[in-house]
Amino acid sequence: MKSSIKRRKRAKVILTNGIMILIMLFYLLPFWYVINNAFKEKSYISLQPFTIRPEIFTFDSIISAFEKMNYTTTFLNSLIVLVLSCTIFVIVGSMTAYGICISGNKWLNYLYVFFVSLIALPFQAAMVPLVSLLKNLGLSDSYLGLALVYSAMFMPFIVFLYTGFMRSLPMEIMESARIDGCSYFQAYVHIYMPLLKTITGIVLVLRGVYVWNDLQVPLIVINDPAKQTLQQRLYVFAQSRIGNFDLVFAGALIVCLPMVILFLLMQKSFIKGVMAGSIKG
């Protein structure tokens, strides 16, 4: 009886691992296809799309794409937008959730329910009013305007995450802080924000990756070629070089490489943060 149970468990583990391996290969195949063909001349891509030999390996496509995309300037543009967006995400999202949780005001709770319901609102429905509002405020074609659009898109979800996490914290923390003479702002900065490291990390990773990889919003907001983001520049670069797959693959690789490197460096922290957040919730 025990041996049959062990065999069933072993078969279940093998089946689960097999499915996970297939899923992993499914996701890795496109990435390998890009890497493999980014270091070839165009003539070899159609002949050997999934393999590469040392004699045909070359950095020429990478160097050419780097120069023609003006990668350094465009990378800084994307970095500025990412930093501005993430700063607004954390400060506004955490302070909004803090006010909702600490005040205990029923009207704020009603406002929170309405705010969270905006998660279901598609961006396309608010796209035209947002762009019109940016033009009226003089923020069109600017880094701040782009960051504000991302904030409008993601703030309901971010407030939802922060509020759910804060509500799991005991109110005795605030009561003790007030007895010790802390103002509400001091309690927010010195007590609550350190406790929100886990959820802040999750917000930065989930929404930051989206901001970095997004193409739709920059195409709508940014018209100045000098302020284009990496994804926007890659789109223009690929459109102007239809058929030059060596340059397109090389451009795609150098655009996604920063996020891949960041994830590889921080994957342990990210996994720990997600697990801690799920246990805390």
Image (tube, rainbow, N blue to C red):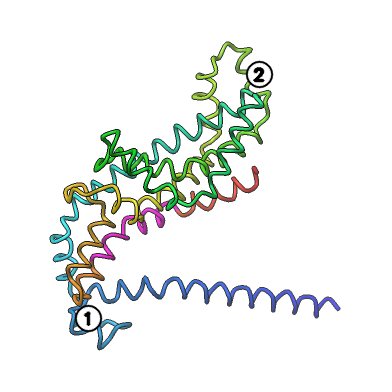
The answer to which of 56 and 217 lies nearer the viewer is: 217
Q: Residue at x 24, y 72 (%)?
A: 38
The amino acid beneath tag 2 is Glu
Residue extent of the magenta highlight: 251-266
Residue of label 2:
175
Which corner quadrant of the image does residue 169 belong to? top right
The answer to whether 13 appears left or right of 47 in the picture is: right
In the rendered view, does 144 fall on the left or right side of 277?
A: left
Task: State the SS at label 1.
Answer: helix
- 26 is higher (above) or lower (below) than 154: below
- The residue lying toward the viewer, choosing from 106 and 80, is 106
Q: Residue at position x 65%, y 47% from top?
A: 279
Which class describes the residues within 10 Å of circle 1: few (<14), some (14-19), or many (20+)?
few
- Image coordinates of residue 14 in percent, x first then y, are 64, 77
> From the image, which quarter does the N terminus lie in?
bottom right
Residue 82 appears at what percent x and percent y? Answer: 34, 44
Closer to the chain start, of discs 2 and 1, is 1
Residue 106 place in picture, x, y as percent: 66, 27
Image quarter hosting the C terminus:
top right
- How far is mark 2 from mark 1, CA to CA? 67 Å
Does 107 appear in magenta? Answer: no
Q: Which residue is mark 1?
A: 54
